[in-house]
Image: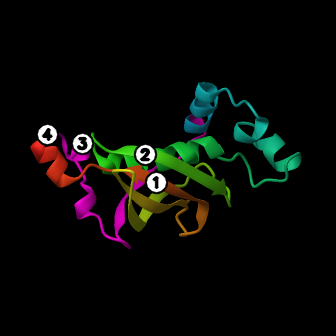
Amino acid sequence: MTETARQVYWEDVEEGQEIPSLAKGPITTRTIMQWGAAVGDYYEIHYDDRFAREMAHLPGVIVHGTYKFALLGQLLSDWHGPAGWVRRLGCSYRGMDVPGEVMTARGRVKGKLQREGEHLVEFEVWTENPRGERTTVGEALVLLPRRESSQTG
């Protein structure tokens, strides 16, 4: 396994633990345009600076919310390893991210639970800009294997 593919086990996770952050950027208008093309979102606020400023009263073009959501998904997937699974992920957009800045995804364990034979980890997740402002906040539920299960079977 590669370093990013190492497996995290349920027994190794503790409430309050922060997982390794994931930084992207600086985000460019090219990145924004490529993402828009990939997901079919051609709203002018993501590529037309004049439209974004004059018509939408924004500071300029902004990063797609779906890009930020995907970044949170990558944060968790990179962390949990090949036998883990992101069971649920939801977020709300609280601020705008703009080209020229690094965007960082972060996560913290809220709790652990066992349900119907599954071993789950609840997360608080967010993206933040270089000033430490949380621009997207959310929650996730990740399924992890047990260490003893992986060794016996």
Distance of label 1 from label 2 (alpha carbons): 6 Å
Give the labeled residue for mark 2.
Answer: 86
Q: Residue at x 39, y 51 (%)?
A: 116
- On-image quarter of the C terminus: top left
Earlier sequence position, callout 1 versus callout 2: 2
Between label 1 and label 4, give the one nearer the viewer.
4
Between label 3 and label 4, give the one nearer the viewer.
4
Q: Label 1 is placed on what type of residue?
A: Leu
What is the crowding at mark 3: few (fewer than 14 residues within 10 Å), some, or many (at least 20)?
some
Distance of label 4 from label 2 (alpha carbons): 22 Å
Is residue 122 placed above or below 66 in the rendered structure? Answer: below
Earlier sequence position, callout 1 versus callout 3: 3
Between label 1 and label 3, give the one nearer the viewer.
1
Between label 3 and label 2, give the one nearer the viewer.
2
Distance of label 3 from label 4 (alpha carbons): 20 Å
Which mark, by number, is residue 153? 4
Give the labeled residue for mark 1.
Answer: 141
Q: Secondary structure at mark 1?
A: strand
Which mark, by number, is residue 67? none
Q: Residue at x 25, y 45 (%)?
A: 4
Q: Residue 77 sits in which quadrant? A: top left
What is the crowding at mark 4: few (fewer than 14 residues within 10 Å), some, or many (at least 20)?
few
Q: Secondary structure at mark 3?
A: helix
Distance of label 3 from label 2 (alpha carbons): 15 Å
Q: Label 3 is placed on what type of residue?
A: Ala
Q: Is residue 1 left or right of residue 61?
A: left
Near-viewer residue (120 or 44)? 120
Q: Is residue 14 left or right of residue 43?
A: left
**Image: magenta residue range:** 1-30
Q: Position of residue 122 (x, y in %)?
A: 44, 61
